[in-house]
Image (cartoon, rainbow, N blue to C red):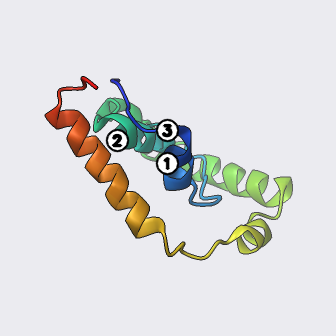
């Protein structure tokens, strides 16, 4: 996708937003998009992001949604985990985000040469 001038701390802090995974609505494709945008200012191909919509628009969507809901509810108590894992907005988040954007801007201005 491209080069990144940020260290691991910034990436993990920026991307740690708790447990929001859902097989069809917020999955690994969305995570990959967030990573690509964050690190490189690039996007993954649209057809990959649209794959869940293809499934949801198929004849099997109702049965699949029911199956996904059953699996999620029986696999682990997601709602309880989210409540326990809920983190307050860090007062340093806005400052960190500004630093990240500044580093990204400097990286682009310098043409990736540092």
Q: Residue at x 68, y 50 (%)?
A: 68
Q: Residue at x 64, y 72 (%)?
A: 87
Q: Residue 4: x percent and y percent?
A: 38, 31
From this viewpoint, is residue 26 visible?
A: no
Spatial distance from mark 2 to mark 1, Cα to Cα?
Answer: 14 Å
Determine contact: label 2, label 3, CB under 8 Å.
no
Q: Residue 83: x percent and y percent?
A: 73, 74
Q: How many marks?
A: 3
According to the picture, the residue beneath numbered tag 2 turns out to be 37
Where 74 falls versus 106 (above or below)?
Answer: below
Q: Residue 48: x percent and y percent?
A: 40, 31
Choose mark 2 or mark 3, whichever is in front.
3
- Of mark 2 and mark 1, the one earlier in the sequence is 1
According to the picture, the residue beneath numbered tag 1 turns out to be 10
39 on left or right of 91:
left
Spatial distance from mark 2 to mark 3, Cα to Cα?
Answer: 16 Å
Instruction: Name the image quarter holding residue 70.
Output: bottom right
């Amino acid at each position: 996708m491209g080069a990144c001038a940020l260290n691991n701390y910034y990436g993990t802090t920026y991307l740690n937003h708790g447990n929001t995974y859902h097989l069809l609505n917020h999955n690994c494709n969305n995570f990959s998009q967030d990573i690509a945008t964050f690190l490189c200012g690039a996007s993954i191909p649209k057809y990959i992001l649209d794959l869940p919509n293809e499934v949801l628009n198929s004849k099997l969507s109702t049965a699949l949604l029911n199956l996904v809901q059953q699996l999620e509810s029986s696999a682990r108590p997601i709602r309880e985990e989210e409540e326990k894992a809920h983190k307050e907005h860090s007062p340093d988040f806005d400052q960190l985000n500004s630093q990240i954007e500044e580093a990204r801007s400097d990286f682009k201005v310098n043409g990736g040469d540092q």
